[in-house]
Image (cartoon, coloured by chain):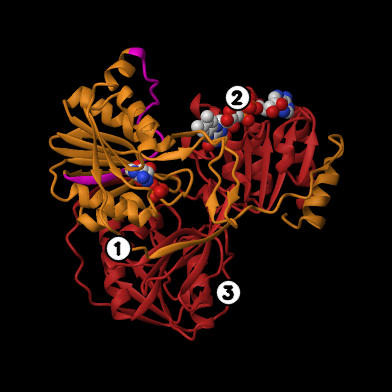
Chain colours: A red, B orange
Amino acid sequence: MNILVFADHINGQFKKTAFESVSYASRVAKSNNGICTAVVLGKMNDPAKLSGFGANKILEVPYDGKFSSNVYSSVLMELANRENAELVVVSHDLNGKSIAGLLAAKWGAGSVTGVVSMPEFHNDGMDVVKGVFSAKAYARYRIKSAKKVISVMPNAFPPEEVGGDANIESVNISIPADRIEVLSVERAEGKVPLPEADIVVSGGRGLKGPENWHLLEDLATTIGGVLACSRPVADVDWRPHNEHVGQTGIVIRPKLYIAVGISGAIQHLAGVNNSKVIVVINKDPEAPFYKAADYGVVGDLFEVVPRLNEALKKYLK
Amino acid sequence: MEVIVCISKSPDTTARIAFTDQNTKYDEQGVQFIMNPFDEFYALVRGVELQEKEGAQLTFLNVGPASNDIIIRKALAIGGNKAVRIDTEPKSAWDVAKQIASYLKDKTFDLVLFGKETIDYNGSEVGAMVAGILDLPFVSNASKLEFENGNFILNRDIEGGIEKIRVAAPCIISAAKGMAEQRIPNMRGIMMAKTKPLEVVPAVETEDLVELVSYSLPVEKSGVKLVDPENMDELVRLLSEEAKVI
Ligand SMILES: Cc1cc2nc3c(=O)[nH]c(=O)nc-3n(C[C@H](O)[C@H](O)[C@H](O)COP(=O)(O)OP(=O)(O)OC[C@H]3O[C@@H](n4cnc5c(N)ncnc54)[C@H](O)[C@@H]3O)c2cc1C
Ligand SMILES: Nc1ncnc2c1ncn2[C@@H]1O[C@H](COP(=O)(O)O)[C@@H](O)[C@H]1O
């Protein structure tokens, strides 16, 4: 089975999710005696990097526009047809999410988004598992159509370096006229996006006010983590909206989630309970978060957090 | 301006999640249903604001059974001119998208607004699929939407930032947090909703490309290990040696 995988980049640097998707797609291709073809749109600093993650072939599409779900999905569809691909893999990040459904509808493919399992093949289709009910359950779906599209959940499959020397081909393709115009892009430079972070340090109302966030900033700096927050904290503008995690915020699955002064309401847990390890710091031993935690520290965060920061500094030195 | 807001039903955010029929059906017993928060808080309210400011004609569209009428009436209590329900129990995102697209295909409209995702199936797919079927421009996760000189000016959320986008009508947009502020229906709205038209239209046949095999629940955590708040060296040791995450 041939697989086409979309490798997204920001200003010429691959996203971590690009390596994850390519790694995933190449594992599936390998176990099905197929070819894994990675697609890159626009100028890349080092497209060959993808062969290290198992791509058999890399297609470079000359393109100097900005991201457009309409253009990208059309290009992927055309290349999937040319490469005889049965399955197209994208990441379930913000660009991937806006491509998947469009591509599926235009191409006539069955699709499942937010996949957290390797596919399993049956006579009448391909099974994949995804989180449903905001991470409170899983659903196994069978895609029965010949053409298939999936988006793979960020941080669910660590990229695997396998080495390789894929050919890079520049493809000749006519780019469809775009009907959206990107006027400007604002992005915090050099910041790891929350859904890609391995370690997340998160704060809730227990911090009492934005002036106390330096405690979490220090901890995050020490441990190499990214900041997040509960919804009420973003609602009152203590923190920006793009740090709000949960059912109505961002869903994350880091290796380590440190929750400070957060009670652990079910809507909050929905965004974080797929984290590998959860540490809860809360002065209330009855806080619901302890039921979802691996490690707990019952105490006053204003004492515990600086102490943890010192202990980490000592350990990491 | 003609604006259509697609609204869906989802279990309450605190609903118990359980399954029946050998884990192939969501157990709806005792579950309270609400309007999907992304539809209610952002897409719907922005639609109502366009109705108020730009004099837009606002229609709410739902694919679902008669029991969804409560939710549709709630939407009408917040605003809008009328609602349409496509009468079927939705089978999948593809089914919903096909129903919506076949309803829209001979209508004129400037904007169809969706929520960024439903909180039950978390697909983020329906809006994109409708755009794909109808071949219309699609922008997802818009956290701001303005109407200027016949164009929509949007902020689209991207990882760690935003993109500012201009798109001409007609187009399909999915709404994220920030596009509007939640509104609570008032008494007058609730009374007015009763007299607004709610048209029920028959569904079309769709073929299923994807089938649910079964549901499962996550494995429960084995229990929290409490660490002495005076001894953070111990927590660091556990994270490093036992959990191996630092
Ligand atoms: C439709 C809907 C959707 C929602 N979506 C989300 C969502 O996506 N994300 C989300 O987070 N919430 C969401 N919520 C809100 C959620 O229900 C909770 O209200 C919210 O998560 C609580 O935030 P919190 O834990 O910061 O605050 P609180 O519940 O007030 O908890 C503060 C905690 O801090 C502790 N604390 C206080 N002082 C100290 C101290 N000195 N040291 C240590 N601990 C201390 C307290 O013991 C308490 O447990 C949603 C709610 C609804 C109705
Ligand atoms: N049954 C439905 N009727 C009308 N609109 C729907 C329905 N299901 C989903 N939608 C819309 O599609 C959006 C995305 O849904 P999903 O792809 O399931 O995450 C929702 O926020 C709604 O705006």
Left or right, residue B95 beside residue A21? left
Tell me how far mark 2 sits from mark 1, CA to CA: 44 Å
Marks 2 and 1, the one that precedes in the sequence:
1
Chain letter of disc 3? A
- Which quadrant holds the N terminus of chain A? bottom left
CA neighbours of label 2 inside 10 A, class few (<14), some (14 to 19), many (20+): few
Q: Amino acid type of disc 2? A: Glu
* Start-end of magenta stretch: B170-187
Rendering coords of residue B160 (x, y %)? 45, 46
Q: Are marks 1 and 3 in contact (CB under 8 Å)?
A: no
Which quadrant of the view contains residue A300?
A: top right
Question: Residue at left 37%, top 71%?
Answer: A145
Pointer 3: residues within 10 angstroms few (<14), some, or many (20+)?
Answer: some
Ligand 2 is located in which of the four quadrants?
top left
In the displayed structure image, the side of residue A54 where residue A108 appears, left or right: left
Dot 2: element: helix
Residue type at tag 3: Glu
Tag in front: 2 or 1: 1
The subunit carrying tag 2 is: A
Magenta highlight on residue B184: yes
Residue marked by disc 1: A73
What is the x, y in percent for residue A112?
A: 44, 61
Q: Name the residue under label 2.
A: A211
Q: Main secondary structure of the magenta part?
A: loop
The disc placed on residue A161 is: 3
Does any portion of residue B72 appear in the rendered image? Answer: yes
Q: Where is residue B144 in the image (x, y as percent from the top left)?
A: 32, 35
Q: Is label 2 in contact with label 1 (beta carbons under 8 Å)?
A: no
